[in-house]
Image (spheres, grey):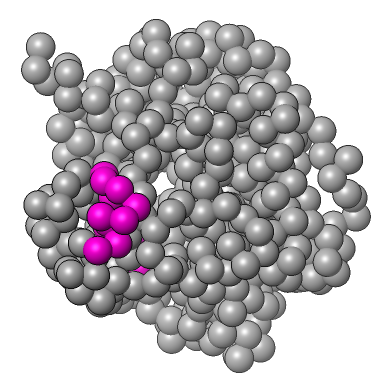
């Protein structure tokens, strides 16, 4: 097992990884920008290293600085966390080339799944269903029109690189496609330095279902059930729950087994998440995230398994030590992503935290690096806390979530807590009757009334 792990990330995920390491008896090194000098993970780590100024490109994306920090502190391994360089194949290669262990999958798998077209081809080749669309990048508008006419409108034009909803446009007709194709390519070029796009069928009312898997280097693979991430705004997840209220046991078993089988056939190692669109009883693979997910805690809550600990173990070469039958699912869990944003306009709200009180009680967990006096910097993602609630039933979970949201206090900055309080009162959400377009339609209807 590792003796010292460098955590190449920030915020609540850096703290989450530190806690897992500490419980395993592993020393931690937390890197930070000058803007994060007072971060909770920095305060609690065994060692910390400043790697640059606030801008991400000069700090958390600065590969030489990260490698140097690992070298001077004598770390054995580097955990990339979530975002930043967590799905950067070249970073994974450089970590290994310099004698450290990358706590994640191989660079080849990161590269394979980082390109959505390559990923779709890879999983389709081992029998996973995919959304109908182009076999590769679409070279020009005429080709896009020919393909879209064949598969039928509406269609989705998507960047082959990147994610987060950038480089993505919906075209409901041939006329729409002309603008959508141009806009998607321009946005993809600006965001990812690559203007290649592909086209797939746009599903009308799909759910976003993802399956958490874990694989060791000995050929063992298990899954930890599915998560429903359909409550989204601009392709960004807002609320996630596990298990999905839309699936029955047969569908749940089918997609979990398919995801685990695919990971095994691909020779995957580490934690990963296979994401699907689900409509009319059918699953369609859309992408795989080769890293830890923001919403991993709800899978931990329904299985009782520490996914970060397991991620570190398999990176160190340890076998899983259990098979699928040992993974038991109990109860229901929901996660609310709390951002430092205006709850109506979603404008970022950085600033000093003047008061902070996390809710508690049975089945309530808060993953956050906030504390009174901490200053939320304006340079990074606005996620400041994750409220995770577990109950024996979905109804109990919902009641507990409402209570926990009412207890949650963050003063000094605006947050999306009022948005979550509103959402959990909506009858559609209570009934579990929502899809990936539900939240945006709800918000649009409220703006017109």
Question: Which residue corresponds to the image point at 73% horizontal and 36% vertical from the top-left?
Answer: 253
Q: Relative to 339, say whether 162 is above or below.
A: below
Count of labels shown?
0
The answer to whether residue 113 shows anywhere in this view is no
Residue 92, position as x, y percentages in the image: 55, 79
Which residue in the rendered view is the most extreme toward the bottom? 97
Q: Relative to 234, say whether 219 is above or below.
A: below
Nearest the eye: 394 or 48:
394
Q: Give the left or right position of residue 383, taking residue 29 as reference.
A: left
Nearest the eye: 355 or 191:
191
Residue 77, position as x, y percentages in the image: 65, 74
- Does the segment drawn in magenta span residue 152? yes
Give the quadrant of residue 236: top left
- Indicate the quadrant containing the C terminus: top left, top right, bottom left or bottom right: top left
Nearest the eye: 408 or 282:
282
Question: Which residue corresponds to the image point at 59% horizontal and 73% vertical from the top-left?
Answer: 109
Which residue in the rendered view is the most extreme toward the front? 150
Q: Give the left or right position of residue 440, taking residue 260 as reference.
A: left
Residue numbers of the magenta segment: 146-164
- Does the segment drawn in magenta span residue 162? yes
Residue 65, position as x, y percentages in the image: 43, 82
The answer to whether residue 341 shows anywhere in this view is yes
Give the quadrant of residue 329: top right
- Indicate the quadrant containing the N terminus: top left, top right, bottom left or bottom right: bottom right
Nearest the eye: 434 or 243:
434
Q: Give the left or right position of residue 182, taking residue 377 as reference.
A: left
Question: Which residue corresponds to the image point at 82% horizontal and 39% vertical from the top-left?
Answer: 327
Question: Which residue corresponds to the image point at 12% horizontal and 20% vertical from the top-left?
Answer: 447
Residue 362, position as x, y percentages in the image: 65, 17
């Amino acid at each position: 097992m590792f003796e010292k792990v460098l955590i190449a990330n920030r915020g609540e995920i850096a703290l989450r990884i530190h806690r897992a390491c500490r419980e395993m008896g592993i020393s931690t090194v937390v890197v930070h920008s000058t803007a994060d000098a007072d971060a909770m993970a920095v305060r609690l780590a065994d060692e910390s290293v400043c790697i640059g100024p606030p801008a991400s490109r000069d700090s958390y994306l600065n590969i030489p600085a990260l490698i140097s920090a690992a070298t001077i502190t004598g770390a054995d391994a580097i955990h990339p966390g979530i975002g930043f360089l967590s799905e950067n194949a070249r970073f994974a290669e450089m970590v290994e080339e310099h004698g450290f262990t990358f706590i994640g999958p191989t660079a080849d798998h990161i590269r394979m799944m980082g390109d959505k077209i390559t990923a779709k081809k890879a999983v389709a080749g081992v029998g996973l269903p995919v959304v109908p669309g182009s076999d590769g990048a679409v070279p020009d508008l005429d080709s896009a029109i020919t393909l879209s006419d064949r598969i039928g409108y509406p269609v989705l034009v998507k960047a082959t690189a990147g994610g987060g909803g950038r480089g993505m446009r919906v075209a409901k007709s041939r006329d729409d496609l002309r603008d959508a194709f141009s806009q998607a390519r321009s946005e993809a070029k600006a965001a990812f330095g690559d203007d290649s796009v592909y086209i797939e069928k746009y599903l009308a009312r799909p759910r976003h279902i993802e399956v958490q898997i874990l694989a060791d280097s000995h050929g063992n693979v298990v899954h930890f059930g599915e998560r429903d991430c359909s409550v989204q705004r601009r392709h960004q997840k807002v609320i996630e729950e596990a298990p999905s209220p839309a699936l029955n046991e047969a569908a749940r078993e089918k997609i979990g087994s398919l995801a685990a089988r695919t990971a095994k056939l691909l020779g995957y190692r580490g934690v990963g998440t296979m994401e699907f669109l689900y409509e009319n009883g059918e699953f369609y693979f859309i992408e795989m995230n080769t890293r830890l997910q923001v919403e991993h805690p709800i899978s931990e809550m329904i299985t009782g398994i520490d996914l970060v600990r397991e991620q570190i173990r398999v990176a160190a070469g340890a076998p899983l030590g259990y098979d699928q039958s040992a993974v038991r699912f109990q109860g229901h869990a929901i996660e609310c992503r709390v951002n430092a944003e205006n709850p109506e306009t979603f404008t970022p709200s950085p600033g000093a935290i003047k008061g902070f009180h996390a809710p508690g009680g049975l089945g309530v967990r808060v993953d956050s690096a906030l504390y009174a006096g901490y200053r939320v910097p304006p340079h990074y993602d606005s996620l400041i806390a994750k409220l995770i609630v577990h109950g024996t039933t979905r109804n109990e979970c919902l009641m507990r979530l409402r209570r926990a949201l009412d207890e949650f206090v963050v003063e000094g900055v605006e947050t999306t807590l009022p948005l979550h309080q509103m959402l959990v009162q909506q009858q559609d959400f209570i009934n579990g009757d929502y899809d990936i377009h539900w939240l945006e339609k709800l918000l649009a209807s409220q703006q017109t009334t």
